[in-house]
Image: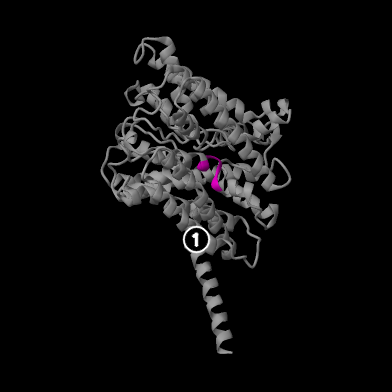
Amino acid sequence: MNISIIRRILGYVLILEAAMLLLPCIVALVYGESDATAFVVVSVLCLVIGAITGLKKPKSDMFYLKEGCVATGLSWIVLSLFGCLPFYITGTIPNFIDALFETVSGFTTTGASILSDVESLPRCMLFWRSFTHWIGGMGILVFLLAIVPLSGGTGSNINLMKAESPGPSVGKLRPKMRTTAGYLYAIYMLITVLEVVMLLCGKMPFFDAITTAMGTAGTGGFGIKNDSIGGYSPYIQWVVTGFMIAFGVNFNVYFLLIFGEFKKALSIEEIRWYFFTILSAAGILFASTYDHAYHNASEALRHSAFQTASIITTTGFSTADFDTWHGLSKTVLVLLMFVGACAGSTGGGIKVSRFVVAGKGVVREIKSYVHPKSVTKIKLDKKPLDSSVTRNTYIYLITFMFVFVVSMLLVAIEGKDLLTNFTAVAATINNIGPGLELVGPTKNFGFFTPFTKVVLIFDMLAGRLELFPMLLILNPAIWRDTAKQGRRKITKVNNKINK
């Protein structure tokens, strides 16, 4: 394994984080808050360590999918470890595990919080929480590829994109990966700015608009109010609903629309299923909540549409305590947690495309029983899928179930009720945020023991990185190979010294 290139990528990530930490520092200075020093100290620390590890040229620039997965997993761990330090140093979150939980939840765009009163936080901390969503939404390494000319060639760089980007597959919008990453972030920024403008038109305060837009863009859901989005006007709630859905769309669609390929964009099958699921779920929620929770049709429709968009895109904002809704509504919302948004979006979950492929696989198997001699291929967008795509889909679903079950067993050790445990794991591994019962939309995750929080931290990282990068890091064979390489280098050095 090419350790030197992984070390360099980690160094670049820390240098980038050093720059990111200056933004909340500026916010602290603007609002006259005393926490600016903590951000400066951590920024300098990141810069020094990043320069030491990142600026040393590796012997080989090439890296393959294995290195891409390990680099991605370690990058997100390092990013979170340093990113939680401002919370911990200032005493905003005095417990290190809690600070790490909050930061991982931010970068992975989960939105699960251990805080019971977010309105008591300084504005610079609120900004940092929301900004971690924005960076984590599109991906820190995608941003790195967009601004840093990493060597190693397109074949190497796409391995980073594959390891970090949500969804079954990653394609190139342009021949060069740096150009592709640049287009993705340009579209991302454009839609974010558009949401800020729309929110300001609804007379939302500027700071609120910025933080809400970043939370929506990353489909994260950290609110700056204790009632999330519930206290804002119906206009603002509808705007956020629309943009949550927009950020759950595959960004390739926007690329095609910008360059005038409307027919191709509208023919993507996953998009049709995505909107069909949203309309169906919102309709069921409306029928279930009207007269039961709300006696006003427009109010019932607004809350139903908002919560559907929030859960399927894994944003996690809320306008109401859906834990008090009818059992049918809660069941639909839990199912939406697993569906998730589109591949290539900022949303989490298993992804609509995987369910489409798996569903077509089931239909094909049933047909094979009826017509044993028939040979049919699974098609997506009217094109036959390669057998490797369907195989990868099934492997992902099996792996997801395995990680989910193990996490459930580990979380259950604490002794909380089944619905709390189930939805806590579902909300973290799918990067949703709120669950039901003790982790409902009006509650938080602060009551869990440190052990359970560590399990949920792993789930958040595994869910955001599509499982395999984090599982690869836990594979002892990776570290045995690394240790062997280290021993060989030491032996070579000793031999040179002896000579």
Count of marks, rendered view: 1
Q: Which quarter of the figure has residue 233?
A: top left
Question: Element at badge 1?
Answer: helix
Q: Residue 263, located in which quarter of the rendered image?
A: top right
Q: Closer to the camera, 289 or 28?
A: 28
Residue 107 is one of the magenta-drawn residues? no
**Residue 138 is a magenta residue:** yes
Instruction: Choose between 416 and 177: the one closer to the eye.
Output: 177
From the viewer's perspective, tell me whether residue 190 is left or right of residue 424: right
Q: Is residue 246 above or below residue 448?
A: above
Q: Which residues are magenta?
A: 135-140
Q: In this orientation, which residue lies closer to the viewer: 158 or 26?
A: 26
The colour scheme used to paint the residues is: one colour
Looking at the image, residue 157 sits to the left or right of residue 3; the answer is: right
Report the amino acid beneath label 1.
Val
Q: Residue at x 44, y 45 (%)?
A: 25
At which x and y percent is residue 489? Answer: 56, 76
Image coordinates of residue 56 in percent, x first then y, are 59, 65
Report x, y in % for residue 93.
32, 46
Give x and y (percent) for residue 375.
69, 37
**Left or right of 283, for residue 168:** right
Residue occupied by mark 1: 48
What is the magenta segment's predominant secondary structure? Answer: helix
Residue 84 visible in this rendered orientation of the protein:
no
Depicted 205 relative to depicted 121: above or below: above
> Residue placed at 50% from the left, 24% from the top?
199
